Image (spheres, rainbow, N blue to C red):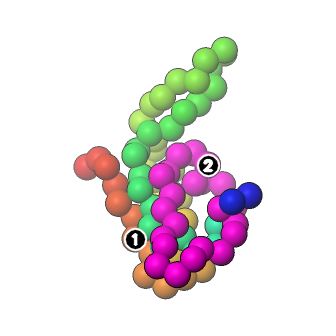
Amino acid sequence: MEVFKPLPEGFRKVVISTNIAETSITIPGIKYVVDTGLVKEKNFKALITSKCSQTSCIQRRGRAGRDVPGGVVFRLFT
């Protein structure tokens, strides 16, 4: 719930992108997204980390600048 509170002057909100960034939740004031290119998926009894699809990466990019102009995504992969 902390993420929905307004920020003091001079602070920024940054999303470190995971599968959660692909949901329909809009966090107000998000201008920057850092995309690791990885996803955690439940497989039987464990969480397995794997590379995400190109479609998922495009969806994650949509989190940046949804309600503020000038959104930027930083991808940690080529």
Q: Position of residue 12 (x, y in %)?
A: 48, 71
Q: Which quadrant of the figure has residue 28?
A: bottom right
SS for dot 1: strand
Q: Amino acid at mark 2?
A: Ile
Judge whether 44 appears above or below 21 on screen: above
Q: Which residues are magenta?
A: 3-26
Query: Magenta segment: does it hold 13?
Result: yes
Residue that label 1 marks: 72
Q: Counting other residues with Cα less than 10 Å from the Cα at mark 1, is it few (<14), some (14-19), or many (20 or more)? A: some
Q: Position of residue 4 (x, y in %)?
A: 70, 66
Judge whether 74 appears above or below 37 on screen: below
Please give left or right for residue 71 compared with residue 6 in the image: left
Q: Counting other residues with Cα less than 10 Å from the Cα at mark 2, is it few (<14), some (14-19), or many (20 or more)? A: few
Q: Earlier in the sequence, mark 1 or mark 2?
A: 2
Q: Looking at the image, can residue 26 be seen?
A: no
Q: Residue at x 40, y 44 (%)?
A: 37
Judge whether 9 appears above or below 78 on screen: below
Residue that label 2 marks: 20
Please give left or right for residue 74 compared with residue 42 in the image: left
SS for dot 2: helix
Judge whether 56 appears above or below 12 on screen: above
Q: Residue at x 34, y 55 (%)?
A: 75
Q: Which quadrant of the figure has residue 40?
A: top right
Q: Looking at the image, can residue 52 be seen?
A: yes
